[in-house]
Image (tube, grey):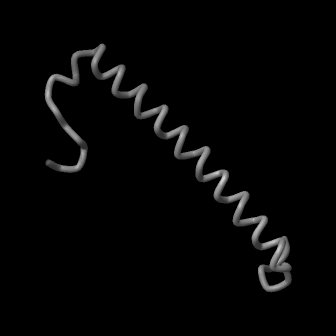
């Protein structure tokens, strides 16, 4: 593994771009799982009340 101090500016920018893309993909996947969970809760009758999951 290459140390950050040894990487060029261009290489560091590319690593950041790759990480940003990965984060974007993971956020999309999480959104899809949330939609699936909500759909399953509705089908199972567990969504009779409005619960945001944030303690309110």
Q: Is residue 20 left or right of residue 46?
A: right
Q: Is residue 55 left or right of residue 40?
A: left
Question: Is 24 above or below relative to 6?
Answer: above
Question: Is 9 above or below relative to 48?
Answer: below
Q: Position of residue 29 (x, y in %)?
A: 54, 38
Q: Is residue 36 left or right of residue 53?
A: right
Q: Position of residue 31 (x, y in %)?
A: 46, 38
Classify residue 43 by image quadrant.
top left
In this rendering, the count of numbered labels is 0
Q: Nearer the viewer, residue 7 or 45?
A: 7
Q: Position of residue 44 (x, y in %)?
A: 28, 15
* Residue at the bottom extreme, as displayed: 5
Q: Position of residue 36 (x, y in %)?
A: 42, 25
* Residue at the top extreme, as displayed: 43
Give the residue drawn at x 75%, y 65%: 15
Classify residue 46 by image quadrant.
top left
Give the residue drawn at x 85%, y 83%: 6
Q: Nearer the viewer, residue 45 or 10?
A: 10
Give the residue drawn at x 75%, y 70%: 13
Q: Is residue 54 left or right of residue 26?
A: left
Which image quarter is the N terminus in? Answer: bottom right
Question: Is 24 above or below relative to 19?
Answer: above
């Amino acid at each position: 593994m290459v140390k950050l101090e040894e990487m060029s500016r261009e290489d560091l920018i590319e690593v950041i771009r790759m990480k940003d893309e990965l984060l974007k993909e993971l956020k999309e996947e999480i959104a899809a799982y949330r939609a699936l969970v909500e759909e399953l809760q509705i089908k199972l009758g567990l969504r009779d009340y409005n619960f945001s999951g944030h303690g309110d």
